[in-house]
Image (cartoon, helix red, strand yellow):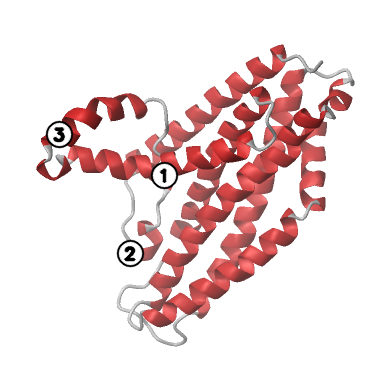
Amino acid sequence: MLSFCLSALRSGFRSRAVLLILVLGALLVGVAFLAASFSPRQPKTVTLDVGFSGMRFSLVLFAVFWVQELVGREVERRTVLYALSYPVSRDAYVVGRFAGVVSLLAVAAALLGMLLWVSALLSGGEYEQAHSVDLGWAYWSTIGGFWLDAVVVAAFALLISTLSTVQMLPVALGAMFAVAGKSLGAVLDYLERGADGDALIMARFGPLMDVIRWVIPDLSRLDWRVWPMYGLPLGEGAIASSLLLATGYVFVLISLAVMIFRRREFF
């Protein structure tokens, strides 16, 4: 398993993804820094808000790209048979490749997080806003939440890769899964508030959302940006439940991916 993880890391660093990270990082810093000029009273807060949104999108993009590059393409081209010709189990291949993608996402999150951190420090110049941002533990915890968000998406894309025969299907379905997971929280909140009194919407979509919430994870629970931006710490229970939800979902997805890949025929 370790050998597959290391080979995934080497392949990831040799690909154009590293250059893409640097380009996106530069764009992220530039856009976040320029966005601060539109809010003279809270430049650092605006920088973090824009930067967090860009980082969250970028990490999901990297997640589906690396899964497709390291697993989906090998399966589609049958080059996976060379790896499986060694005396190792298929389980080790799936788990090792996933560990490699998770490690690559951690490196990307750290690099993008450091660039945004520098941008937030420099934005606003010497101006001290009324509510200062927290660039310490709260900031890096938020980066960790975005990383875990991308890990969940990567696990789903990996599951699709183990059963798909279409090369771009993991990318397409992974992106759709990410959008659905990030939007689920807002939809559930809208319905729980009564849908602005619209009984038809409640009757039509309420039961459906009660089912969907058990199938698709609420990835918005991993977005903790209000903590570093506004100094509103999340409760320990909320963070613990979010972590438990994400790790449990990843475990289920990887277990299903291992079971499917173990029985898949490549001939």
Q: Which residue is disc 3 drawn over? A: 200
Left-right relation of 208 to 70: left
Left-right relation of 102 to 1: left
Q: Mark on residue 224?
A: none
Q: Mark on residue 182?
A: 1
Left-right relation of 265 to 250: right
Judged by depth in the image, the label closer to the viewer, 3 or 1, is: 3
Asked if residue 217 shows in the view, the reply is yes
Q: Element at badge 2?
A: helix
Above or below for 260 versus 108: above
Mark 2 to mark 1 CA distance (whole Å): 21 Å
Q: Which residue is disc 2 drawn over? A: 230
Asked if residue 1 shows in the view, the reply is no
Of residues 238 and 262, which is closer to you in this image?
262
Q: How crowded is mark 2: few (under 14 residues within 10 Å), some or many (20 or more)?
A: few
Please tell me which residue is depicted at 53% across the width and 23% down the height of the picture.
252
* Amino acid at circle 2: Tyr
Mark 3 to mark 1 CA distance (whole Å): 24 Å
Ranked by sequence position, the earlier of labels 3 and 2 is 3
Above or below for 222 versus 262: below
Contact between labelled residues 1 and 3, with CB atoms less than 8 Å apart = no
Q: How crowded is mark 1: few (under 14 residues within 10 Å), some or many (20 or more)?
A: some
* Amino acid at circle 1: Lys
Above or below for 21 versus 86: below
Contact between labelled residues 2 and 3, with CB atoms less than 8 Å apart = no
